[in-house]
Image (cartoon, grey):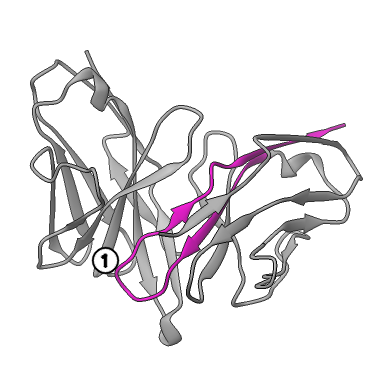
């Protein structure tokens, strides 16, 4: 099956620093990747849609200058949390879309990255 | 805007008993519905999609457009079914992400 990896799996940083999270599709090309955020005991919330070669599309309420997304290749998307603060501490999960004919959309999820901002 | 509702945060049943995890959605168009499962310390993985109408690990789910529901069912629960289950909706088109419900933690007691 299609595999999506994330790196790092866990990161702890000081307030004010920036953190980059990578999302890779290992055995398929993904023109579209998605970034989700999950708070403890809550559901996944879509943050943004990352399209290869173009600007990301952000969901309402998500600051694009805070969460920088780059999708430079068909297998890699990065999320950079700029000037991180403790309230940014969360579990960040990416997914990659495997497109099939007829508009069907299945997404394969990465294992997630636990970000803790001190 | 679309919404997915899973009314039960926690569902505990005994092994061998039937299981039904409820999912209701609101969306004005024709959605694609999915069930994702997350076992302990593992990533989210697709369990079912309404388009394929298949049965995976004994689970089935039928899309009821009249009731806007997509409940997940299994006639005889097994201990290995214990996990978090998320119902998700895709509104169609190529660029949109999924809208998830809050999830139901299913515990199968021996």
Q: In this view, does B67 lie above or below A66?
A: below
Q: Mark 1 lies on which chain?
A: A
- Is residue A68 part of the magenta span, yes or no? no
Residue B101: % across, % down? 53, 48
- Count of labels in the image: 1
* Magenta part of the chain: B83-110
Q: Where is residue A16 in the image (x, y as percent from the top left)?
A: 8, 20
Q: Residue furthest bottom?
A: A102
Q: In this view, does A45 lie above or below B54?
A: above
Name the residue beneath numbered marker 1.
A32
Residue at the (35%, 76%) spot, across then down: B93
Residue B67's quadrant in the figure? bottom right
- Residue A93 lies, in percent from the top left, at 35, 44
Q: Is residue B1 left or right of residue A78?
A: right
Using the image as rendered, state which of residue B95 and residue A30 is in the foreground: B95
Horizontal and vertical percent position of residue A72: 10, 61
Which quarter of the figure is the C terminus of chain A placed in? Answer: top left
User: Element type at marker 1?
Assistant: strand
Asked if A82 appears above or below B64 in the picture, the reply is above
Residue at the image position 71 percent from the left and 69 percent from the top: B62
Question: How busy is the neighbourhood of tag 1: few (under 14 within 10 Å), some, or many (20 plus)?
Answer: many
Location of residue A19 with respect to A62 vertically, above or below: above
Seen as rendered, the residue at the extreme top is A118
Q: In this view, does A116 lie to the left or right of A110?
A: left
Drawn side of residue A27 relative to residue A105, left or right: left
Could you tell me which residue is drawn at 74 percent across and 42 percent down?
B80
Who's the residue at 79% across and 39% down the image?
Answer: B79
């Amino acid at each position: 099956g299609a595999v999506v990896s994330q790196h790092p799996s866990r990161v702890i940083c000081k307030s004010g620093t920036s953190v980059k999270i990578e999302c890779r599709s290992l055995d398929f090309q993904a023109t579209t990747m998605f970034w989700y955020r999950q708070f403890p005991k809550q559901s996944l919330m879509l943050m943004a849609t990352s399209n290869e070669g173009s600007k990301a599309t952000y969901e309402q309420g998500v600051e694009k200058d805070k969460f920088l997304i780059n999708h430079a290749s068909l297998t890699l998307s990065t999320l950079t949390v700029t000037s991180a603060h403790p309230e940014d501490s969360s579990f960040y999960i990416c997914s990659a879309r495997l497109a099939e004919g007829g508009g069907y959309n299945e997404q394969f999820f990465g294992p997630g990255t636990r970000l803790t901002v001190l | 805007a679309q919404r997915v509702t899973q009314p039960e945060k926690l569902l505990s049943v005994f092994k061998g008993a039937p299981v039904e995890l409820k999912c209701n959605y609101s969306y004005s168009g024709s959605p694609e519905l999915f069930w994702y499962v997350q076992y302990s310390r593992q990533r989210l993985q697709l369990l079912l999609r309404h388009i394929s109408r298949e049965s995976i690990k004994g689970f089935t789910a039928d899309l009821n457009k009249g009731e806007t529901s997509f409940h997940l069912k299994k006639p005889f629960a097994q201990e290995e079914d214990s996990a978090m289950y998320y119902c998700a909706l895709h509104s169609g088109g190529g660029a949109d992400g999924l809208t998830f419900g809050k999830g139901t933690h299913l515990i199968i007691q021996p």
